[in-house]
Image (cartoon, rainbow, N blue to C red):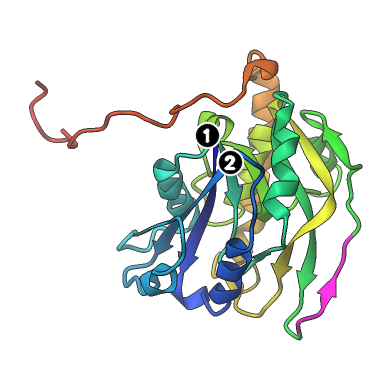
Amino acid sequence: MPTLSIITAAYAPGAAYLKETVAGVEQQELPTGWQLEWVVQEDGAAPSLAHEFANVKSVLYEANGAQLGAAATRNLALSRASGDLIQVLDSDDVLLPGALGTLIPAFDDNRIHWAVGQADDLMPDGSRVPWDSALDHGTVRAGSVNRWAESHGGNWPIHCAGLMLRALSLRAIGGWVGLPGDEDIAMFAALSEIADGCNVDKVTWLYRQHPQQITRSGATRHLSEDCRRLALQRAKAVQLTGLNFADQGSCGFIPNAHLVDVGPALKGEKPI
């Protein structure tokens, strides 16, 4: 039975809206034959959110026990995920009813490695502000997203906080990039350069706007130009070196592809 893993990097100081995020996940219905797991990884030296998930079905919660940042926290969650597909979900955003069931069918085409639905901005007063997609709906060919970003000052037309991705593809390009910000864009720049995706013509989630959100108030906001520059450099490097998925059409769902054996670390120990 294929599995979809939702990955959420949670952080207590930014968890004021977590109950609405939980409610959005709990109302999801997957297509027949699919099962759901929600992999939550809490960042921060003093984790305090475990109780928020105590009664939530299919949650796999762990805490870093240290302040590691969004990229490392998402990657640690990815290491625990068993899903064939990965759905990104921030702890202040909301999945609308039917969101996951709307995106999953896009992956019936083995050439599709990522998909995203449209998002309305959820304003502090509860109102919703819609946005027209900058890209055509349907199949998005490899490289076209980055060409758009190159011509628009390093700004991407796809909102990475709502992405659904093949787990194999996400791991193959190294997961989220170790940057202080825009780590999701730098990840997506590499993936979308070598893989087709799907821009779904339906609003599937709400992107919450509030004063405490990391992208608005984070201490690293001033580094955004550097982070987005690296994302474009990464896309260009992938293009120029010819990196690719050898046969996009062969990348379906491979059972237990996440299973590997890992023992105690031998750093500083004499090799056996």
- Check residue 71 for magenta coloring: no
The rendered magenta stretch, by its main secondary structure, is classed as loop
The amino acid type of the residue labelled 1 equals Met
Q: Residue at 48% across / 26% down in the picture?
A: 255
Q: Position of residue 127 (x, y in %)?
A: 81, 80
| Residue 155 visible, this angle | no
* Picture quadrant of residue 259: top left
User: Is 62 placed left or right of 271 in the picture?
Assistant: right
Dot 1 crowding, Cα within 10 Å, few <14, some 14–19, many 20+: few
User: Is 30 placed left or right of 124 in the picture?
Assistant: left
Disc 1 element? loop
Residue behind mark 2? 34
The amino acid type of the residue labelled 2 equals Trp
Pick whichever of labels 1 and 2 is earlier in the sequence.
Answer: 1
Q: Position of residue 166 (x, y in %)?
A: 60, 34
Q: Residue at 70% across / 48% down in the picture?
A: 101
Task: Tell me the magenta residue range.
Answer: 126-131
Residue behind mark 1? 1
User: Is 191 placed left or right of 64 in the picture?
Assistant: right
- In this view, the residue in front, 52 or 79, is 52
Q: Residue at 76% across / 86% down in the picture?
A: 125
* Picture quadrant of residue 209: bottom right
Disc 2 element? loop
Q: Residue furthest bottom?
A: 125
Residues at marks 1 and 2 touching, judged by CB atoms closer than 8 Å: yes
